[in-house]
Amino acid sequence: MANRSYKNIKSDIRAQLTADFNALIQIALEELTRPEVSPVLTGFFASSWKASTTRVRTRDERENFSPWDKIKTVSMPSGYVILAAGEQPIIQPRHAVSQFKLGQAVFIGNTVKYAADALASPKNKIPEFVQGEMNDLVKSVFSDKNRPRIRVAAQQGEGGRNLFNLFGPSQKYVSYEVPGEEP
């Protein structure tokens, strides 16, 4: 941005915010696939997170998608379902992540038909993620740490006070320093 005209600042900032917005969506989807967040039995639920500009519909059944259709489960007398001996869950994101425009409403949801049952699982940590870690993600993605600062004149003065003391006692200047903040 240093070599570009100040006239382009609006489009440059909008492009950066759009890139950050899309990065946030990508990171959120990646975090939701983690077994520490989503309940995992076969891995199909954790693999089925999707971002869309419309509400995400729950219609996918594990039996219709490879490799999850080959994972064997066992129903216990208590009603719980567990993996059959020797089976391992598979977590592979199933949905490509689109690029969204800044200001667009984006819905993140799960496409599996049994999403409500998975969310009722004691292994479900999604509410904690959304209420806690997601807030931290927003702060880290949209952080202006290590980015150039944009300054607007903070005060006007007269006399020899300036960055290089180049002005005489009667010359006017504009200070870009914010009182109490390091330049």
Image (spheres, rainbow, N blue to C red):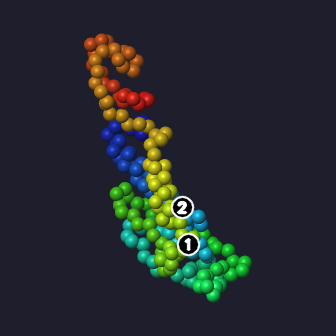
Residue 129 percent coordinates (x, y): 50, 61
Q: Residue at x 52, y 72 (%)?
A: 48
In the depicted view, which residue is nearer to us: 121 or 170? Answer: 121
Q: How many marks?
A: 2
Q: Quadrant of the N terminus?
A: top left
Q: Is residue 144 left or right of residue 38?
A: left
- Residue at 41% x, 66% y is 107
Disc 1 target residue: 122
Residue 44, placed above or below residue 155: below
- Residue at the location (42% across, 72% down)? 56
Q: Nearer the viewer, residue 24 or 39?
A: 39
The image shows residue 119, relative to residue 24, as above or below, that is below
Disc 1 crowd, CA 10 A, few/some/many (<14, 14-19, 20+): few
Q: Give percent across and percent down for residue 160.
A: 34, 14
Residue hosting label 2: 31
The answer to which quarter of the image holds residue 175 is top left
Q: Which mark is residue 12?
A: none
Tell whether label 1 touches label 2 (CB within 8 Å). Answer: no
Identity, as a three-letter code, of the amino acid under mark 1: Pro
Q: Left of 37 or right of it: where is 89?
A: right
Q: Report if residue 163 is visible in the image.
A: yes
- The structure residue drawn at horizontal position 36% and vertical position 19%, both measured from the top left corner, is 162
